[in-house]
Protein backbone atom coordinates (compact mmCIF):
# COMPACT_ATOMS: atom_id res chain seq x y z
CA UNK A 1 0.00 0.00 0.00
CA UNK A 2 1.30 3.46 -0.87
CA UNK A 3 2.36 5.84 1.92
CA UNK A 4 0.07 8.60 0.60
CA UNK A 5 -2.90 6.26 0.88
CA UNK A 6 -1.91 5.30 4.45
CA UNK A 7 -1.89 8.91 5.61
CA UNK A 8 -5.24 9.73 3.98
CA UNK A 9 -6.94 6.55 5.21
CA UNK A 10 -6.68 7.28 8.95
CA UNK A 11 -7.84 10.80 9.68
CA UNK A 12 -7.59 11.16 13.46
CA UNK A 13 -7.86 9.25 16.74
CA UNK A 14 -11.18 9.75 18.51
CA UNK A 15 -10.43 10.59 22.13
CA UNK A 16 -13.60 10.69 24.23
CA UNK A 17 -14.55 9.34 27.64
CA UNK A 18 -16.26 6.36 26.07
CA UNK A 19 -13.31 5.50 23.82
CA UNK A 20 -10.94 5.83 26.80
CA UNK A 21 -13.02 3.30 28.75
CA UNK A 22 -13.01 0.91 25.79
CA UNK A 23 -9.27 1.36 25.45
CA UNK A 24 -8.60 0.47 29.07
CA UNK A 25 -10.89 -2.54 29.32
CA UNK A 26 -10.64 -4.12 25.85
CA UNK A 27 -7.27 -2.73 24.62
CA UNK A 28 -8.90 -0.96 21.67
CA UNK A 29 -8.09 2.34 19.98
CA UNK A 30 -10.79 4.30 18.12
CA UNK A 31 -9.92 6.11 14.87
CA UNK A 32 -11.87 8.32 12.50
CA UNK A 33 -11.21 6.85 9.04
CA UNK A 34 -12.15 7.48 5.42
CA UNK A 35 -15.66 6.39 4.41
CA UNK A 36 -14.33 4.24 1.56
CA UNK A 37 -11.83 2.35 3.75
CA UNK A 38 -12.36 -1.35 4.43
CA UNK A 39 -11.17 -3.42 7.40
CA UNK A 40 -8.13 -4.92 5.66
CA UNK A 41 -6.85 -1.50 4.59
CA UNK A 42 -7.38 -0.05 8.08
CA UNK A 43 -5.51 -2.97 9.69
CA UNK A 44 -2.58 -2.62 7.31
CA UNK A 45 -2.43 1.17 7.73
CA UNK A 46 -2.41 1.01 11.56
CA UNK A 47 0.23 -1.73 11.59
CA UNK A 48 2.53 0.17 9.22
CA UNK A 49 2.06 3.65 10.72
CA UNK A 50 2.27 2.80 14.43
CA UNK A 51 4.38 -0.42 14.29
CA UNK A 52 1.90 -2.48 16.34
CA UNK A 53 0.15 -5.82 15.87
CA UNK A 54 -3.59 -5.57 15.19
CA UNK A 55 -5.82 -8.54 16.06
CA UNK A 56 -9.25 -7.28 14.98
CA UNK A 57 -10.94 -4.28 13.34
CA UNK A 58 -14.60 -3.33 13.75
CA UNK A 59 -16.13 -0.42 11.85
CA UNK A 60 -19.29 1.64 12.10
CA UNK A 61 -20.67 4.54 10.09
CA UNK A 62 -21.88 7.51 12.13
CA UNK A 63 -24.66 9.46 10.45
CA UNK A 64 -24.28 13.23 10.41
CA UNK A 65 -26.67 15.20 12.58
CA UNK A 66 -29.00 17.94 11.41
CA UNK A 67 -28.10 21.31 12.89
CA UNK A 68 -29.88 24.63 12.90
CA UNK A 69 -28.68 28.19 13.03
CA UNK A 70 -30.25 31.52 12.17
CA UNK A 71 -29.59 31.02 8.45
CA UNK A 72 -31.35 27.68 8.16
CA UNK A 73 -30.89 23.95 8.59
CA UNK A 74 -27.75 22.10 7.52
CA UNK A 75 -26.42 18.55 7.88
CA UNK A 76 -23.02 17.52 9.19
CA UNK A 77 -21.04 14.96 7.20
CA UNK A 78 -21.17 11.22 7.81
CA UNK A 79 -17.97 9.58 9.01
CA UNK A 80 -16.66 6.09 9.74
CA UNK A 81 -15.25 4.94 13.08
CA UNK A 82 -12.81 2.06 13.34
CA UNK A 83 -12.37 0.17 16.62
CA UNK A 84 -8.90 -1.38 16.38
CA UNK A 85 -8.04 -4.19 18.82
CA UNK A 86 -4.35 -4.49 19.62
CA UNK A 87 -2.41 -7.56 20.73
CA UNK A 88 -1.41 -7.91 24.39
CA UNK A 89 2.17 -6.68 23.93
CA UNK A 90 1.31 -3.76 21.59
CA UNK A 91 0.52 -0.21 22.68
CA UNK A 92 0.06 3.18 20.99
CA UNK A 93 1.17 6.37 22.74
CA UNK A 94 -0.31 9.63 21.38
CA UNK A 95 1.51 12.06 23.70
CA UNK A 96 4.70 12.39 21.62
CA UNK A 97 3.02 12.71 18.20
CA UNK A 98 2.43 16.03 16.46
Image (tube, grey):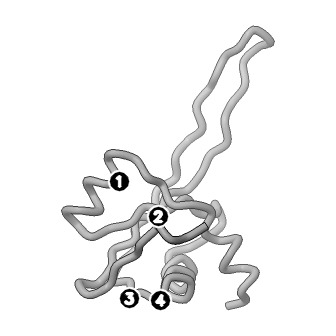
Indicate the quadrant containing the N terminus: top left, top right, bottom left or bottom right. bottom right
Instruction: Measure how far apart labels 4 and 2 are at the Cα level.
Output: 17 Å
Above or below: residue 84 compared with residue 90: above
Callouts 4 and 2 close, C-beta under 8 Å: no
Q: Earlier in the sequence, mark 2 or mark 3?
A: 3
Contact flag, marks 1 and 2 (Cβ < 8 Å)? no
- Pinpoint residue 40: horizontal percent, then vertical percent: 52, 82
* Distance between the alpha carbons at the discs numbered 3 and 4: 7 Å
- In this view, the residue in front, 22 or 55, is 22
The residue that appears at 33% across and 74% down in the rendered structure is 85
Q: Quick check: marks 1 and 3 in contact, CB under 8 Å?
A: no
Q: CA distance from mark 2 to mark 3?
A: 15 Å
Identify the residue under disc 3.
Answer: 53
Q: Callout 1: few (<14), some (14-19), or many (20+) C-alpha neighbours within 10 Å?
A: some
Q: Position of residue 18 (x, y in %)?
A: 32, 47
**Circle number at residue 82:** 2
Looking at the rendered structure, the secondary structure element under dot 4 is loop
Q: Nearer the viewer, mark 1 or mark 2?
A: 1
Amino acid sequence: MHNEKLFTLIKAPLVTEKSARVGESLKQIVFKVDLSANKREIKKAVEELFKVEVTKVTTSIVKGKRKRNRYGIYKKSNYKKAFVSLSKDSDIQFEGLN
